[in-house]
Image (tube, rainbow, N blue to C red):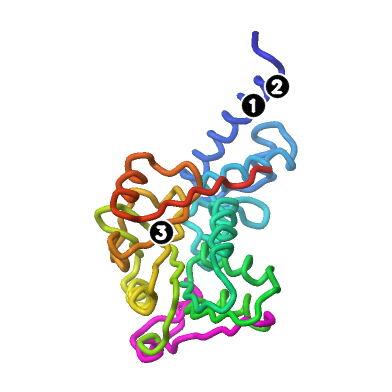
Amino acid sequence: MTTESSLGETFAEERQHQIGRLVVERGRVRVGDLAARFGVSGVTIRKDLAELERQGRLVRTHGGAVSPSGAGAERAFDVRERLQRTEKDAIGRAAAAMVADGESIALDASTTAYAMARHLGARRDWLHLTVVTNGLRIALELAGCPGVTVVMPGGFIRPEALSLVGPMGEGLLARVNVQRAFLGATGFSVEAGLCDGTEEEAQIKRLLVAAASETVGLVDRTKWSRTSLATFCPTPALTAVITDAPAPVLMAGALRDAGVRVVEVPAATA
């Protein structure tokens, strides 16, 4: 027997499926138009959009949503930060818990590393923590936190990533000692390792890997078994990978066989 609750869930899933198709076809949708089309309230549509954003199928904007591939009107960092936000927050929390006072760590300019930085800043119990980063948002997040020293390499600003890139950072990174580098990626596979979509970002990340004794990948489930333009950390150079559960069984097994620790953290649910 079909219950009223299950019918409601079915209708919501079908409506969300149609909204997802509209975003693909049109590139942009508005809450008011969708509410009129489906005969539901704006509150209901906003819940649908939030669920579709969680799935990575769209990006919410003021009054509606856009396709992730068509969100050029907003800075890429702000768009990416909203994708898989719950998963990235869980990964960032677990990564921050691995850091001990007195360490020197490196964070790249990824949105998952930014989630980690927020948790580092929230601890407020540091006596001496050094954070090397090329991420402008990360540096601002940790600047002024008691006991935290932020070190940034020189370079050119990439506005879309809010990062510093370029060869000028090599001089600093060649002289620092970092216990662990925590790095996000746009793609990750056993064969290719951690990858980035731009060579500029990959170049600075290679320098962070070279400066660190250990490298920890921060990879949500949308990045598994994907490759991007440039590898910056091959799998044998990885110490651990932190991801939202469950990780792909075969790939996780191959990583563990290669001596890479796989940390699976469930994302909190609303």
Residue designated by label 3: 240
Residue designated by label 2: 5
Task: Tell whether label 2 touches label 1 (CB within 8 Å).
Answer: yes
Q: Is residue 139 left or right of residue 68?
A: right
For the magenta stretch, what is the residue range? 145-172
Residue 9, numbered circle: 1
Residue 214: which quarter of the image? bottom left
User: Where residue 176 sits: x, y (%)?
Assistant: 42, 86
Residue 63, numbered circle: none
Q: In this view, does 64 lie to the left or right of 160?
A: right
Label 2 Cα crowd, 10 Å radius (few <14 / some 14-19 / many 20+): few
Q: What residue type is labelled 1?
A: Glu
Q: What residue type is labelled 2?
A: Ser
Q: Which element type, helix, strand or loop, lies under badge 2?
A: helix
Please tell me whether residue 6 is drawn above or below residue 195 in the rendered image: above
Whether residue 105 appears in magenta in the rendering, the answer is no
Q: Which element type, helix, strand or loop, lies under badge 1?
A: helix
Please tell me whether residue 100 is drawn above or below residue 79 in the rendered image: below
Tell me the mark number nearer the camera, choosing from 3 and 1: 3
What separation in Å lies between label 2 and label 3 (alpha carbons)?
A: 42 Å
The quarter of the picture where the N terminus appears is top right
User: Where residue 157 sits: x, y (%)?
Assistant: 46, 82
Q: Which element type, helix, strand or loop, lies under badge 3?
A: strand
Please tell me whether residue 11 is drawn above or below residue 232 in the rendered image: above
Mark 2 vs 3, N-terminal side: 2
Q: In this view, does 98 lie to the left or right of 221?
A: right
Of residue 225 and residue 197, the one placed in the foreground of this image is 225
Whether residue 168 appears in magenta in the rendering, the answer is yes
Label 3 Cα crowd, 10 Å radius (few <14 / some 14-19 / many 20+): many
The quarter of the picture where the C terminus appears is top right
Residue 97: which quarter of the image? bottom right
